[in-house]
Amino acid sequence: MIQLSRSKRKLEHIRHALSREDLGMNSFDEMEIIHQSLTDIHWDDISLQTQLGELTLSSPLFVNAMTGGGGEKTESINRELAIAAKETGIALAVGSQMSALKDAKERRSYEIVREENPDGIIFANIGSEATLDQAKEAVDMLKADALQIHLNVLQELIMPEGDRDFSGRLRQIEEIVENMEIPVIIKEVGFGISMETARQLKNVGVSYIDVAGQGGTNFSKVENKRRKQPFESFNQWGIPTAISVKEVKSVFPEAHVLASGGMRNGLDGAKAFVLGAKGFGMAGHLLRILMKDDIETLIAEIDHIHHEFQIAMMVLGAKDTYMLDGKPHIFTGRTKSWLEQRLPSF
C-alpha cells in the first residue's frame, strides 16, 4: 500500500510540474554578459565538449532528474528522454530510484534508460537517506556513469507523507563518496546550495555539486497542491540559481559545479559557464516539450539550445566551453544586492 502511494505521488509530481505557472524570479535575467564585437575564431572550430571532473561530456547540457517509479507512464517518458539524449549526445539523469530500491516492479521504469541509450552518459539518483548498499544497487541498475544524491529537506517537510528525520545524512553522504568508484554529485531539488552547505560538503569529500536553484520547478508549490492546508509561505523559498553558483564557487572554487533550476535556453547555460559552472541541466522545460509535442520536437529544441550556446561562445571568443569562465559580466537588481551582502568582494 505504501508503494502504491509512492507511485501515485510520482505521477502527481509530473502532473503538477507540467502545469506552467509564473516561476517568479529568474536570476539569469539580472545578469548581463558584456558583448564583444571582435572574435578571432571560426564557427567550425567551436567545441561543445565539456570536462566535468572525471567525466568527458559531448555537450554542456544534460537532462536533469525528473521521472521514474510511476509505472508504465514514467517508463514511456524515460524511454523517449533516453532516445532524445542518445540522438543529441547529451547526458541524462533519472529521477529518484528509491522507489525501485523498495519495490523491484519499479525497476523497469529506470532500466529502460540504459537499454535505449547503451553508450550514453547516465546519472543514477538516490535520496540522502540511502545507504551505501542502496547507492551501489542504484548505480548497478543503470550501469551508471555518475550518481546523484538529492537533498530535499523542504520538499519532504511540506510533503504530507514526507520524512521528518534527517539525522546522520551528512555522514551517509561521506560514506558513499568514500566508497564509490564513480563521481558522486550532490544536488538540490530547486532550492539552491548555499556557501555554508558547500563548505559542509567539501569537508566530507564531495567535489561535484548541482546547485539546482530556485527558478524552475517549484517543489514547495508542487507539494502544497497535494495538501489540504498548504504552507504557502514557503512558495518563494530558496536561492536563485545564478546566485547559488556564485555562493558555491566563492568558498569551493575547485568544485565541479552544475547549474540547474530554471534554465530556459542556451544563453542561460552560457551565463552559468561564465560564472564557473561545468554543465547545465534542464528538466521541466524539456519534459513539457516532450509531453506537449513529440520526441522529434524535443530533439529539435535540444539542437536549438546547443546552437544558442555556440552563438554565445562565438561572440565571446571561446572555442572551448572552459574559456567562457570569467568572461566580462555584470549583475543588476536583487541579484546584485544579494551578492553585495553575501559576497562583498564578488
Image: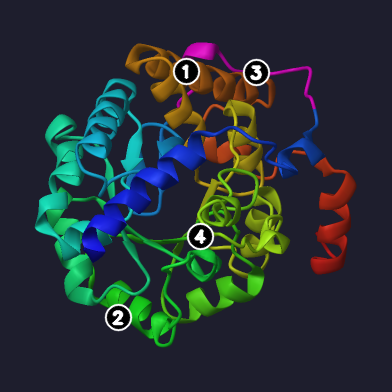
Q: Which of 120 and 41 is in front in this view?
A: 120
Q: Is mark 1 on a helix, strand or loop?
A: helix
Sooner in the amino-acid sequence: mark 1 or mark 2 = 2
| For discs 4 and 3, the disc positioned in front in the rendered view | 4
Task: Identify which amino acid the numbered label 1 is placed on.
Answer: Glu
Residue 345 counted in the magenta span: no
Please name the residue shown 58% across and 35% down the image.
269
Q: To which residue does mark 1 refer?
A: 301
Q: What's the distance in space between the residues labelled 4 and 3, CA to CA?
A: 39 Å
Give the residues in magenta. Answer: 35-48
Residue 175 bears which disc, if any? 2
Q: What's the distance in space between the residues labelled 1 and 2, CA to CA?
A: 39 Å
Q: Which of 260 and 339 is in front in this view?
A: 260
The answer to whether 339 is drawn above or below residue 276 in the figure is below
Give the number of marks.
4
Q: How crowded is mark 4: few (under 14 residues within 10 Å), some or many (20 or more)?
A: many
Please name the residue shown 19% across and 43% down the image.
109
Q: To which residue does mark 4 refer?
A: 188
The answer to whether 91 is drawn above or below residue 151 in the figure is above
The answer to whether 240 is drawn above or below residue 320 in the figure is below
Q: What's the distance in space between the residues labelled 3 and 2, CA to CA?
A: 48 Å
The answer to whether 315 is drawn above or below residue 126 in the figure is above
Please name the residue shown 24% across and 50% down the image.
145
- Residue 264 position by quadrant: top right
Q: To which residue does mark 3 refer?
A: 40
> Does the rendering let one see residue 282?
no
Sooner in the amino-acid sequence: mark 3 or mark 1 = 3
| For discs 1 and 2, the disc positioned in front in the rendered view | 1
Q: What element carries label 3?
A: loop
Q: What's the distance in space between the residues labelled 2 and 4, CA to CA?
A: 19 Å
